[in-house]
Image (cartoon, rainbow, N blue to C red):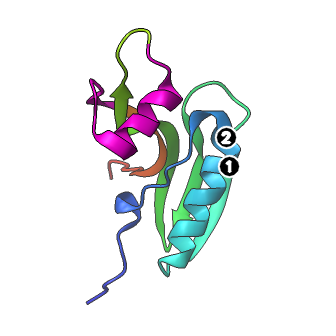
């Protein structure tokens, strides 16, 4: 049995401001590091939308996307308090009014391309 991580389970956390090209490269690196052989069929990093490109991973085709996909914690500081001051207070004396919530952040991932036979 193959114990490599399935390509659809490989997530590359790459911020939106780093761009689709970087996201595509990081995903390719991670899937290669997991032991998969990958062939890039096409790229679409310069086109609008969240698609980065199409790859072939050992005979199966995948569409690589870069969009909001992963959860990240976000601190909300009280009104009038500076973010750095709040961070210092958190490390020295506790939360002091800072609350936490979640939001989605960008990542690259693979979606299988399933063609009806």
Say which residue appears at 65% left-offset and 33% top-offset: 17
Characterize the local packing of mark 2: few (<14), some (14-19) or many (20 or more) Cα atoms within 10 angstroms: few
How crowded is the residue under tag 1: few (<14 C-alpha within 10 Å), some, or many (20+)? some
Tell me, for residue 18, which label it has, or none.
2
Q: Position of residue 51 (x, y in %)?
A: 56, 37
- The residue beneath circle 1 is 22
Q: Is residue 9 visible?
A: yes
Query: What is the C-alpha distance between the residues marked 2 and 1?
Result: 6 Å
19 over 117 or under it: above or below: above
* Quarter placement of the N terminus: bottom left
Secondary element at image label 1: helix
Discs 2, 1 touching: Cβ within 8 Å: yes
Q: In percent of the image, x 34 and y 15: which residue is there?
A: 78
Q: Position of residue 67 (x, y in %)?
A: 48, 34
| Residue at the image position 30 percent from the left and 27 percent from the top | 98
Q: Secondary structure at mark 2?
A: helix
Residue stretch rendered in magenta on the structure: 81-103
Splitting the image into 4 quarters, where does residue 4 fall? bottom left
Magenta span includes 29: no
Reply above or below: 106 against 76: below
Q: Does the stretch in magenta take in 95?
A: yes
Residue that extends furthest to the bottom in the rendered view of this protein: 1
């Amino acid at each position: 049995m193959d114990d490599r991580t399935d390509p659809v389970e490989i997530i590359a956390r790459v911020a939106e401001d780093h761009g689709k090209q970087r996201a595509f490269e990081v995903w390719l690196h991670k899937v290669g590091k997991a032991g998969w052989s990958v062939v890039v069929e096409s790229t679409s990093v310069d086109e609008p939308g969240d698609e980065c490109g199409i790859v072939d991973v050992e005979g199966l085709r995948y569409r690589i996307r870069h969009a909001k996909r992963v959860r990240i914690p976000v601190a909300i500081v009280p009104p009038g308090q500076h973010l750095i001051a709040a961070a210092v207070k958190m490390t020295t004396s506790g939360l002091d009014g800072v609350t936490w919530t979640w939001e989605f952040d960008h990542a690259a991932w693979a979606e299988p391309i399933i063609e009806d036979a």
